[in-house]
Amino acid sequence: MSSSAPGSRPSSARGSRLWGVDAARGLALLGMMTVHVVPTTDPATAEATWSGMLFSGRSAALFAVLAGVGLALLTGGAGKAGAAPEHSNVQVTWFRKVIAVRAAVIIGVGLFVAMLDAGVAVILVHYGVLFILALPFLRLGPRALALLAAGWVATAPVLYWWLQNLLRPDPSEPAARLWHSPMIFDLAQPGLLALDLFVTGYYPLLLWPAYLFTGMALGRLRLGRGAVQVRLFLGGITGAVVTYGVGWMVEARSGVLERMRPYAGSDDALQGSLETGDHFLPLVTDPLWFLIPMPHQGSHLDLLHTISCAVGVLGLMLLLVRILKWPLAPLVGAGAMPLTLYVGHLMVLGPFWRMDGAPLAGVEETTLLLWLVVAALAAGMLKVLLRRRGPLEAMTHGAGIAVAGPHRR
């Protein structure tokens, strides 16, 4: 996450690049808020809702890809971290200290905010662990990072498939997991916590480095160049359409839907599960699971589809800030303070939401979502005007500097 304030040097390539990245992150944040408030499937029919169709799986994946972009920008952008030979070791060591401390703070925040009982699969602990996993790879350039991401996409789903089937020989029985977001109390059962974090939980860290390394590879590109932005947009959109189309053909012609229907109960519930990844279907046991782009499943096609969507959105936002810089400023500012707004919306949802997702105090889902979006954009605009970090961003930055010391260039 860049320390540059949105609004600084907005006409420059660097300023425009950072505005575009922050705008994409702001969109990811609003998408995650949407699926946390508006049900992804209709409670009565189990059909996918508009929020599930648009944002389920894609927003969280975009958030993780942009975490990698932010790490790459923080550690040198298009140049490798510590590019100056005489300073390379010192700089990389400093970056690693800062990132490790920030990761620890984010993990700590995540362990506590999960107790707010907001009915949300909180991503913060996983997000922080991803930062730690990235530490050995900070020196890599775009090609090496792209190969690492491609290798992860190719191999991680196979290992995930094997482990899931090993852990749940009966497909009707779930594998061992926490069944809630990791909390501070779960540190007392480290084995189950590790299993949940890496394999059986909401954001399996066996799979999610694919998003992080993709983002780091993107962050090593010259994102301020229009040609790069166009290629990202067109390549991402093409990949998203192709992967979704392949998945549709597999579902329509392979017989997999007939095999899954007994688990769903109805055609609407089956289609809703396929569109939103609500974990009702044991697709991971089916041999065609690898070719189903079902959100939050971690198949090859799921990873390729959500990565493509993330790349397309990043390219689009980088292009849009060239012509809609100030109209997008609230979104940019929101994306520049994601930790503050993410935790803030959980603090709102805690009092308003039960564990079963039912709204309290007579507040409709769309009304609550509107309030959250308006508040996030207003806070984002204020952040742009004041050119200050968000409160939690300032805390993580300060903690990193306190441990690593000032940046030695």
Image (tube, rainbow, N blue to C red):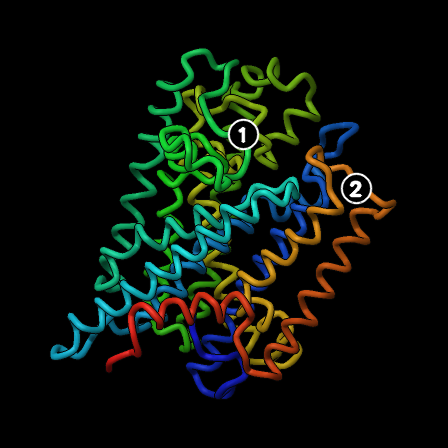
Say if 87 sits above or below 51 in the image: below
Q: Is residue 361 left or right of residue 267?
A: right
Q: Earlier in the sequence, mark 2 or mark 1?
A: 1
Residue 278 placed where, x, y %?
A: 60, 32
The amino acid on which the numbered mark 2 sits, given as a three-letter code, is Pro
Q: Residue at x 72, y 65 (%)?
A: 375
Query: What residue did someone put label 2 on?
Result: 359
141 or 388: nearer the eye?
A: 388
Say if 376 sits above or below 49 in the image: below
Q: Residues within 10 Å of mark 2 (few under 14, many from 20)?
A: some
Q: Is residue 2 left or right of residue 34?
A: left
Tell me which corner region of the image, top left, top right, bottom left or bottom right, holds residue 326.
Answer: bottom right
Q: Is residue 251 left or right of residue 116?
A: left
| Res. 238 in view | no
Element assignment for label 2: loop
Quadrant location, the N terminus: bottom left
Residue 185 placed where, x, y %?
A: 49, 37
